[in-house]
Image (tube, rainbow, N blue to C red):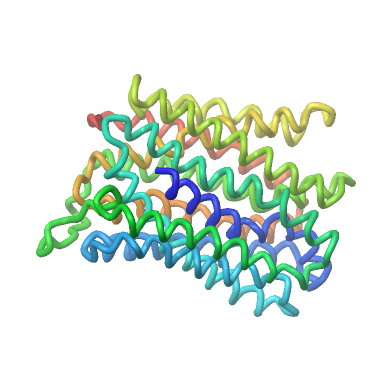
Amino acid sequence: MTPLFLGHLVTDGFGGFFAPLLPLLIDRLDLSLAMAGVLGTIRILSGSLTQPVLGYLLDRAQRPILAIVGPIIAILAMGSIGLVNSSWQLAVLLAVGGLGVALFHPANASLVATTGGGKRGLAMAFFSAGGTLGGALSPLIIVPYVNALGLERTPWLILPGLAAVGLIAVSISNNTTAYRLTTAPPRERFNLRGLPPALIAIWLVIVFRSLAGTSFWNFLAVLITQRGASTLLGGAGISLFSLAGALGGFVGGALSDRIGPRWVMFGSLLLSFPFLLLFLHGPAALSLIFLGLAGFFLFGSTPVGIVAAQRLLPGKTGLVSGLVMGFAWGVGGLLLTPIGWLADLYGLVPVMTGVAFLPLVGAGLALLCREPME
């Protein structure tokens, strides 16, 4: 499990360069908030909507070493972000980097499904925490690095990233028995009509969670810097949001093994709502506390939904992981463009206040997941 954790950390760490650098990129490329939303949508869509297809192909390929191809692509693309001189160049890099992320997630989630044993909720929480931790550490690394050396020096970060991928590749190649993919029967074809109703309900829950989580994560640094804070503090806010989410994922994964996924998804989304509002409108002195609690509860159901979905459709772990990790997250990313456009018209805080209500919809949908998922 440790190599998979490290792979998730590195991939999502590099994939997370965009949001903390967004205030600097807005100034350098003269971007509007609407264009920033479009770029965020491109990054997420390329890294998510392709995941079900890639997961389906991976279920049939039975090639665990494919798990390292995605990180390499993501590292090369996102490590070059400091070289862009126009919005279209940035869009190309975000799209390519997103494809690397898209290949990584279903491949490695399939491997987690074979190594989790009887505690798949906790195993998936450990794997998920790697990505969340990568997203948390990313701003703490990239923002001070760029402030000290400049945006044009980001390609040097590619070298340690590739070194980490090399270690992962060695571990997987030396343990092919432990890291084997759970595959569907070779001649079995995927039938959309055969999806269990509970899987559709889980997918919708994750969509609404992603709508809120993606929107706050993408514009968090901008929200903080608009209050007069530095880009470093903006990046630290993203890190806090992500780290708290990683902790919430551990707690949620452990609880799901005991009380089941439905109540974990319901409770975590319901409790995230007030803290998102308090972060936006509460006392400024307590805003970071509210932000941390919002991240803890909002992302507490991340591994829970993945494991529940995998249990509903055994033998197709790559496809299912692509649906609930990628496609649902991509649909959530579609909201970034209208959010940026509305923020240019009405202000970012009023628009994000409306976004804060979305977890309540997800909590209500979680109650519809009545079909056994154990």
Indicate the position of residue 190 as horizontal and vertical percent values. Answer: 19, 60
Residue furthest toward the top?
259
Would you say residue 46 is visible in this rendering? no
Q: Residue, x 45% and y 56% (percent of image)?
A: 168
Residue furthest toward the right?
228
Asked if 19 appears above or below 213 in the picture, the reply is below
Of residues 28 and 105, the one nearer the viewer is 105
- Using the rendered view, name the quadrant where residue 90 is placed: bottom right
- Using the rendered view, name the quadrant where residue 350 is placed: top right
Q: Quadrant of the N terminus?
A: top left
Indicate the position of residue 82 as horizontal and vertical percent values. Answer: 73, 71
Indicate the position of residue 331 as horizontal and vertical percent values. Answer: 47, 56
Asked if 42 appears above or below 356 in the picture, the reply is below
Asked if 360 appears above or below 45 in the picture, the reply is above
Q: Residue, x 39% and y 32% (percent of image)?
A: 122
Q: Residue, x 80% and y 54% (percent of image)?
A: 144
Would you say residue 44 is visible in this rendering? yes
Of residues 297 and 344, the one nearer the viewer is 297
Residue furthest toward the left?
187
- Tell whether 352 sits left or right of 97: right
- Tell whether 181 sits left or right of 30: left
Asked if 284 appears above or below 242 in the picture, the reply is above
Of residues 153 and 341, the one nearer the viewer is 153
- Tell whether 22 sits left or right of 180: right
Q: Quadrant of the C terminus?
A: top left
Q: Residue, x 62% and y 37% (percent of image)?
A: 243
Indicate the position of residue 232 as horizontal and vertical percent values. Answer: 81, 49
Of residues 285 and 163, the one nearer the viewer is 163
- Tell whether 77 sits left or right of 181: right
